[in-house]
Image (tube, rainbow, N blue to C red):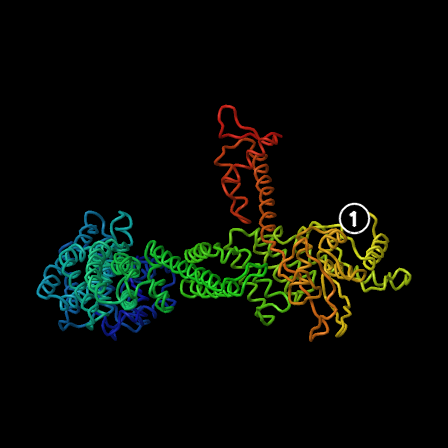
């Protein structure tokens, strides 16, 4: 039996690779390519016992055993395959001869030289697949020979030396003779050729990569090839290349056209030469490029800041940033974008921020004054890029709003002074105009925050702080809390000065509630609002119940449920009162004998919800006494556990006045009606007689008699005929009174309740401070004075801004009432007494 060792290489990548056989490839698909031979061999049943061993780019068919002689076996293979075997096939009939280093390398050198020539454009025949297989097989054989003829290490070294020789003799001289853009083009060409050379030499020497290099953990063939270029070419010329690239970038910044594709290819070399690391790109190019960028824009900015207005400067800065970002997308590495933009922003914006913002006729103040919305939006887009860049912008924004708001306050004060408006319960028209202007001001600058400043928290804070400054200033003796409450009253009551549609009312109420957020004395607003709400509800002056409930919902969302609980109770009371009135009317219908003969409407209120009112034991006329008694009887049928307290000062009466010219219907208060009915029994009464018969105070008597004898409608004649009421005056019925209207309303001069509201609020604040202190101390047991004060302020700040002296006074009061005690060793330390 004869052993034949037949080696046949199958290169599927050569047979199928378009790259290998492309026009630019050093290899060509020849008509004598072994593909048909190998495929024919693999498809024939002759090679019955086959084993395939992967060897680099091919397969080895080894160990073919056959009974015929070697020569007859090969002849049969040739006949079956229809192809001639190469020289190495015939050698398989004999034992493989040892290839020495010099002989094998001479053969490889020819292939390497041919590859170099092709890359240099020197006329040369293309590599055939047979040539490629011969080169690979030579390396394979030289690496698989038994020691000392295993030349793996020597071939590894010669692989590197091949690149070094090619670079020193060909690449470097071609680069040294060129400069600037021509050097860059040559570098791109040389780098591209070098990568092709690395790729194909790596394939020739592929066996080293798979076994020798892998086993010894040496740098791969690809890495060795690229490292040679880095150590010999890149290290020598990277400085010149960097300067040339930066010069081209500066030319483009000045408006010249440059070859961006060339720059892209050059800068890719800085990235690729790092072999996976960005160190070469960052250290050898990027650092210098960023330094040059900073210097370039520093020069530009120093000129622009002197020549251009703020809007023009910002336009240029924005365009520069846009162009630098465009450069990154076209040829710089993406990792440079943030660093590059930061350099530009620093030089154009950060360095000159204060000068730019404070330019006399075009800075931030001027832009706000002239409502330059587009420029303000651009300012935000630019300054939000730099650290703390928006801080000065928001401060100027705050100052501008504060100045405008303060000017509105002064304008309202001046208007009120000029007109010398009388101090009344209803705030004058000028104050109402002031609130409307404040709302418009808030609308305007809230839109700036939303649209120009992208809802940034700094500008919301600036808006809030600015409005807090002037919204807490009073106008013409009225606090901002009272002004807002009165403004709401004018919107919500019938016949108010604010004539608005339902949608406009809802929108305006929403804006008023937003303004309330800036007022520190929210509890004062609540009390004024509650007083005015009571008048609207009790005297049927509310224009729309839905609007009343709507604003309470808005206030509840803004200030919490406790803020609106009493007001909601008032609205509920009115609903229950209407139901109660229906029950009373049914009671009168079912008990005719109880009917007093007077239409009576009674509104029952819950004491805790409503403002406190004076309650006097008015001596009612007999006609009214019966009405009161009938309602008491009805109410006792519903409940016997509630006490009714009659508030006559809030009542109204419709009475008929029989005058000589005609009979007229008078709409008056209960007090006025009681006084007029006295004249049914007497023609003439003195001040003291009226006072004693009604059982009222001097103030109330003076008010009601003044309204009946000194005001527009003189129902009573007074002696002496003066405009003031005194205790010595006499009054008699004016039978000759007449008016063109048959039905007139005689108003009672309003009482200035402002003082009482303030007193009530101060009282409530004392209770609130006491409760807060006790709550804190109960939880903490022991606490220092300063910390107790600060925690108390924090708790109460939502409703009002407590005065430190008031807190200290309440602490002293709680100590005297044995809620707290001072520490014996430390007077500033308090202890809670359970």
Nearest the viewer among 420 and 500 is 420
Asked if residue 59 lies left or right of residue 790, the reply is left
Quadrant, the C terminus: top right
Q: Position of residue 412 (x, y in %)?
A: 47, 62
**Disc 1 secondary structure class:** loop
The residue identified by callout 1 is: 643
Nearest the viewer among 76 and 125 is 125
Looking at this view, name the residue that lies furthest to the top.
Answer: 825
Nearest the viewer among 449 and 327 is 449
State how many labels appear: 1
Looking at this view, name the residue that lies furthest to the front.
Answer: 720
Could you say which quadrant of the image residue 189 lies in? bottom left
Q: Position of residue 452 (x, y in %)?
A: 40, 65
Q: Position of residue 382 (x, y in %)?
A: 33, 62
Quadrant, the N terminus: bottom left
Could you say which quadrant of the image residue 504 lies in? bottom right
Residue 95 visible to an observer of this rendering: no
Q: Is residue 33 above or below residue 775?
A: below
Q: Position of residue 155 (x, y in %)?
A: 19, 54
Q: Residue at 50% across / 62% down in the picture?
A: 420
Residue 179 visible to an observer of this rendering: yes
Asked if residue 789 lies left or right of residue 730, the reply is left
Q: Within 10 Å of the Cα at label 1, are there few (<14), some (14-19), or many (20+) other Cα atoms?
A: few
Asked if residue 789 lies left or right of residue 819, the reply is left
Nearest the viewer among 113 and 498 is 498
């Amino acid at each position: 039996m004869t052993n034949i060792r037949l080696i046949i290489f199958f290169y599927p990548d050569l047979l199928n690779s378009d790259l290998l056989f492309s026009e630019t490839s050093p290899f060509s698909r020849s008509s004598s390519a072994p593909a048909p031979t190998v495929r024919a061999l693999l498809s024939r049943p002759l090679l019955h016992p086959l084993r395939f061993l992967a060897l680099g780019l091919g397969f080895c068919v080894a160990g073919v055993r056959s009974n015929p002689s070697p020569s007859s076996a090969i002849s049969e293979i040739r006949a079956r395959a229809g192809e001639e075997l190469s020289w190495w096939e015939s050698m398989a009939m004999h034992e493989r001869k040892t290839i020495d280093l010099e002989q094998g390398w001479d053969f490889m050198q020819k292939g390497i030289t041919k590859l170099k020539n092709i890359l240099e454009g020197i006329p040369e025949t293309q590599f055939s697949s047979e040539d490629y297989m011969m080169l690979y097989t030579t390396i394979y054989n030289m690496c698989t020979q038994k020691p000392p003829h295993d030349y793996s290490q020597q071939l590894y070294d010669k692989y590197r030396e091949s690149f070094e020789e090619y670079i020193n003799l060909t690449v470097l001289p071609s680069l040294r003779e060129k400069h600037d853009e021509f050097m860059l083009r040559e570098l791109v060409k040389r780098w591209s050729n070098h990568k092709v050379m690395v790729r194909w030499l790596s394939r020739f020497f592929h066996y080293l990569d798979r076994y020798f290099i892998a086993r010894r953990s040496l740098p791969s063939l690809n890495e060795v090839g690229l490292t040679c270029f880095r150590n010999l070419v890149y290290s020598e010329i990277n400085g010149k290349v960097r300067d040339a690239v930066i010069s081209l970038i500066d030319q483009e910044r000045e408006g010249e056209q440059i070859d961006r594709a060339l720059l892209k290819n050059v800068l890719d070399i800085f990235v690729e030469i790092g072999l996976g690391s960005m160190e070469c790109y960052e250290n050898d190019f990027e650092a210098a490029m960023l330094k040059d960028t900073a210097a370039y824009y520093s020069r530009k900015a120093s000129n622009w800041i002197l020549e251009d207005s703020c809007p023009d400067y910002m336009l240029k800065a924005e365009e520069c940033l846009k162009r630098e970002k465009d450069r990154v997308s076209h040829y710089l590495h993406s990792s440079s974008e943030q660093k590059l933009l930061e350099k530009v922003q620093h030089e154009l914006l950060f360095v000159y921020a204060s000068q730019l913002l404070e330019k006399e006729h075009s800075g931030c103040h001027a832009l706000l004054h002239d409502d330059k919305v587009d420029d303000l939006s651009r300012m935000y887009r630019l300054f939000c890029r730099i650290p703390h860049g928006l801080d000065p912008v928001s401060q100027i924004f705050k100052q501008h709003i504060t100045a405008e708001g303060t000017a509105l306050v002064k304008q309202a004060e001046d208007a009120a002074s000029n007109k010398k408006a009388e101090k009344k319960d209803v705030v004058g028209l000028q104050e109402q105009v002031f609130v409307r202007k404040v709302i418009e001001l808030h609308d305007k600058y809230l839109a700036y925050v939303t649209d120009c400043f992208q809802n940034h928290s700094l500008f919301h804070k600036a808006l809030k702080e600015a409005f807090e400054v002037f919204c807490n200033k009073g106008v013409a003796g009225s606090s901002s809390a009272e002004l807002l409450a009165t403004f709401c009253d004018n919107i919500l009551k019938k016949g108010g000065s604010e004539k608005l549609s339902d949608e406009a009312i809802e929108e305006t109420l929403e804006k008023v509630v937003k303004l309330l957020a800036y007022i520190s004395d929210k509890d004062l607003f609540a009390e004024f609002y509650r007083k005015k709400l009571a008048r609207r509800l009790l005297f049927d002056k509310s224009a729309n119940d839905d609007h009343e409930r709507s604003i309470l919902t808005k206030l509840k969302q803004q200030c919490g449920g406790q803020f609106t609980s009493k007001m909601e109770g008032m609205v509920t009371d009115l609903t229950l009162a209407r139901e109660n009135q229906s029950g009373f009317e049914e009671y009168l219908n079912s008990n005719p004998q109880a009917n007093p003969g007077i239409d009576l409407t009674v509104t029952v209120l819950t004491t805790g919800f409503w403002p406190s009112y004076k309650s006097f034991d008015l001596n009612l006329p007999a006609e009214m006494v019966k009405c009161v008694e009938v309602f008491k009887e009805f109410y006792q049928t519903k409940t016997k556990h509630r006490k009714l307290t009659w508030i006559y000062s809030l009542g109204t009466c419709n009475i008929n006045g029989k005058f000589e010219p005609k009979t007229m219907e008078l709409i008056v208060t209960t007090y006025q009606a009681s006084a007029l009915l006295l004249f049914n029994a007497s023609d003439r009464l003195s001040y003291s007689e009226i006072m004693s018969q009604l059982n009222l105070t001097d103030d109330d008597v003076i008010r009601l008699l003044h309204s009946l004898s000194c005001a527009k409608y003189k129902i009573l004649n007074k002696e002496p005929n003066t405009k003031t009421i005194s205790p010595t005056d006499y009054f008699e019925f004016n039978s000759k009174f007449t008016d063109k209207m048959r039905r007139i309303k005689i108003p009672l001069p309003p009482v200035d309740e402002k003082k009482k509201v303030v007193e009530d609020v101060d009282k409530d604040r004392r209770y609130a401070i006491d409760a807060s202190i006790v709550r804190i101390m109960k939880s903490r047991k022991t606490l220092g004075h300063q910390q107790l004060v600060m925690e108390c302020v924090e708790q109460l700040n939502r409703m009002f801004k407590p005065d430190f002296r008031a807190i200290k006074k309440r602490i002293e009061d709680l100590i005297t009432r044995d809620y707290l005690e001072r520490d014996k060793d430390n007077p500033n330390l308090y202890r809670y007494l359970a």
